[in-house]
Image: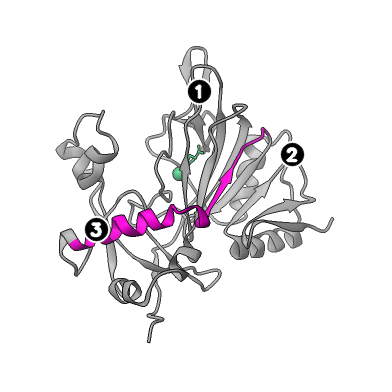
Amino acid sequence: MTLEFRPLQGTFGAEVIGIDPGLRVSDAQFREIEAAWFRHSILLFRGLADVTPADQIDFTRRFGPLHIMVPTDYNLDGHPEVFVVGNDSEGGKAVGLRRAGMGFHTDGEDKVIPNAGSLLYGMQVPPHGGDTLFADMYAVYESLSEEILERIAGRRARFSRIALHHVHYPHLASFTEAQKRERPDVWHPLARRHPGSGRTALYIGRWAVDIEGLLEKDGGELIRHLQALAQEARFIYRHRWRAGDAILWDNRCTQHCATEFDDEKYIRRMHRTTLEGEAPLMAELSVA
Ligand SMILES: O=C(O)CCC(=O)C(=O)O
Ligand SMILES: [Fe+2]
């Protein structure tokens, strides 16, 4: 069956039409899907049915090696590659991570090797709320002024759990010395070249705190300015989930953010498979 890719919002995002509802695809179809993923950054699959954890793992693995989330508390029994997101419970025990991904981020941005992408499958979703927002970080990069491009060219941002833990999780206990050792700061290029598309995206996220080579205060201000810019409506696709949807996003050129829903009243259960990645590539300076 030939696949069709129907754009979601300009060239950002596309719905894959004509795919097998169990995500079983031929090699030729896989090549088309991967090329479309590089063109559109996020792919939406709708009307999926009976995608088992094994089907989801097999499909995602076509794109590259899978990552197993640590700690393993919310990984599916027997299928540790599947990480459960949401408020579902079994036998009185929470099976998923609640309130995951609030705040714009890319998965694994706080690690030396961030994750290339993730496939999130909506098994059970609330009738309203619980949307996921995606930001097109190629478009954000392309909107930057020459002055900002010059300030970020060749520079890396510092991503720091240690510096921002109390900002993002004010309700939690502060970071212990052991946690600080486990989650040291990392630096990634702000202008990131995508190895598949060859295009350049702005690479920041919720753990980015300042910029090497700039005063801490100036770098911090610039990061906050860029993060506010990325959240402008013109760069955002809002996904309203239906059960049976899955989205494959590319962490190298998008950010995403979960939103609230009434979790006293509704169950939201999502299964996520996560791709390993590569050390982010610094893009060449493209300003004169
Ligand atoms: O639940 C969502 O909408 C997104 C959660 C998230 O950030 C993730 O699964 O990586
Ligand atoms: Fe995430």
Residue, disc 3: 221
Q: Residue at x 28, y 70 (%)?
A: 155
Going by the numbered disc 2, the residue's amino acid type is Gly
Extreme residue toward the top, this view = 92
Kind of element beneath mark 2: loop
Vertical relation: 118 (above or below) 277: above
Q: Residues within 10 Å of mark 1 (few under 14, many from 20)?
A: few
Ligand 2: give its quadrant: top left
Q: First in sequence: mark 1 or mark 3?
A: 3
> Which residue position is annotated with label 1?
262
Image quadrant occupied by the N terminus: bottom right
Measured as percent of width and height from the top left, residue 24 is found at 74, 47
Tell me which amino acid carries mark 1.
Answer: Asp
Quick check: can you spot residue 205?
A: yes
Which of the two residues, 158 or 75, is positioned nearer the viewer here? 158
The stretch drawn in magenta includes residue 35: no
Q: Label 2, on which residue?
A: 47
Mark 3 neighbour density, 10 Å: few (under 14) some (14–19) many (20 or more): some
Left of 44 or right of it: where is 256? Answer: left
Report the residue that reaches farthest toward the bottom: 288
